[in-house]
Amino acid sequence: MKTLLTQVAAPFFIAFVFGQPAVAGEANTSVKLAGLHGDPALISRELHGVWMSDGYGWALEIRDDGVRMLDVEQSGCIDAKDTLEEYETYFHSYELDASRNRLGLRGLFEGYTYYFARADALPPQCEVDLVSTPRSNFEFLRDVMTSHYAFFKVRGVNWQEIVEQAETQIRDDMSDDELWKVLQSMIAPIDDGHVSFSRVVDGRRVSFMPGRGRTQNSIIPLALERGDSPGRLFGQWFEEYKASILTDILGGNGKIIARDRVIYGMVDDEIGYLNVLKMGGYVEALGFTLEDFTTETDALNAALDEAFLNMESAKAIIVDMTYIGGGFDYLGREIAARFARKPVLGSHRGPAGIASIEPQPLYTYPTERVSFDGPVAVISSNLTMSASESFVMHMKAMPHVVHMGEPTRGALSEVLSKTLPNGWSVSISNEDYLDGELKSWEGIGVQPDIPMQVFDPMNIFNGHVAAIGQVADHLREQIKPTERPVS
């Protein structure tokens, strides 16, 4: 799944310019944004007041005695202390427009801005403590989904009908297990890889994720046939997937590095191969500071340097994204930069359903590190989702890249998480992730230029190696003597 963009620390709280003219912060107030939660004396007074987010249901209250964030819904408000602490590591700098009534908080790595409008006061429902009852939890979940889930129509879900049916089952004397069953049933019809519902039971987090996708679900009948559990069999498949790449595709000469997240090698003397299994986790046990994420980026780039230098004889490269465990979009753009000949407008992002806010463009820029500008084929499958789908869109925008395989999963949106009054949490898709031409692939999947089957729909263990062979054959036809190799 797409990782929340919370693991980026903010070294300085500074003014910057994007869109309308910015107003500089007060003198001597540049400070780590974490100071919002720590030392209120260091917060610029021009930010004091109440700010309501555009499209995320957040209220940010900045006062002399500190800062708090609230999740605001029609049915009530809930302290979002955890969200504030997490996003403090993401927000890097701020902008106020000329009126000082519109605030932008911008991320360092992602380059995405969350906008807030100044308000006279918190909404009235925030003045009353929201007590946890079966009905208040039902209503809060109802309001979160109604206000922020963006793709009921795309997913073919009649949310109003679901709400009406669930409400008839809500009782004041319900047990937690009974309430969980009802609330879980509300999101069960939503086939979205970014929707999840979770709670802690006896110290262990229990999660429900309704949208696992066609290919991953195909493991279920296979597990029944073999007398195994789907989870264990999928884990076995993943290990065999990696092993078959190293042996059957790369002839025993490939390497897997960066904590088993990056596989590279040569298919033959002319075709290179790169597989990135996750957009993140290249270094073990990192925290959420800027230094940690600089370390993460450096580790990825070191792995890519090694891979590209060892593919220096390649005249074409296969980028295999047929299975990737999500991660961070900015790391995907670090990879795409290795193939960019010039700046590429690959995607747009913004809160869904707000006509007054234009989606923000996101670019891939060429790297100064070792790179490749010859023919490239990106191959995807129904297991390609989230951050890897953003990566595919950025790669497709390059003229020397062809996209082959199956449509991606169609779960591109960032994840918005909300906490219910009883502490249970729901994560949903609330943003439009559009390609460079402002087209949405949510619920559809990014469509390949050359469609082809990757995994056998009856047996996920079959098909991948043969599909890579087809991609290699296609690239061999594209190779020309004038193409430049890795440089």
Image (cartoon, grey):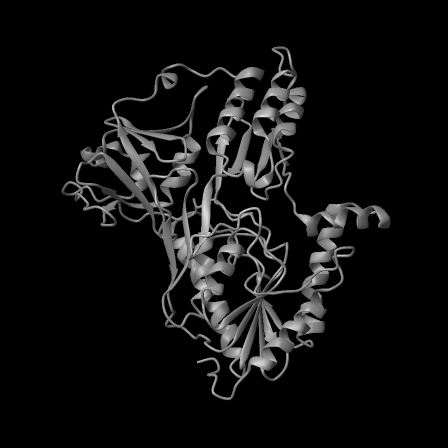
Choose between 359 and 469: the one closer to the eye: 359
User: Where residue 220 appears, x then y in whole percent?
Assistant: 77, 46
Asked whether residue 380 appears in the rendered view, the answer is yes
Q: Quadrant of residue 244?
A: bottom right
> Would residue 303 appear left or right of 33 to someone viewing this image?
right
Residue 310, given in percent of the width and then of the height, sits at: 53, 78
Residue 280 seen in the figure: no
As rendered, which of 241 and 169 lies closer to the eye? 169
Picture coordinates of residue 100, whole percent (x, y): 19, 36
Picture coordinates of residue 44, whole percent (x, y): 20, 36
When the figure is inspected, residue 198 is found, relative to residue 125, above or below; the finding is: below
- Which residue sits furthest bottom? 481
The vertical placement of 478 against 454, above or below, is: below
Image-based side of 367 in relation to 441, left or right: left
Instruction: Give the quarter of the image for residue 330.
Output: bottom left
- Look at the picture and state if 345 lies above or below 37: below
In the image, 421 versus 385, the foreground residue is 385
Which part of the image, by quadrant, shows the C terminus?
Answer: bottom left
Residue at 53% x, 73% y is: 376
Furthest residue in direction left, as rendered: 27
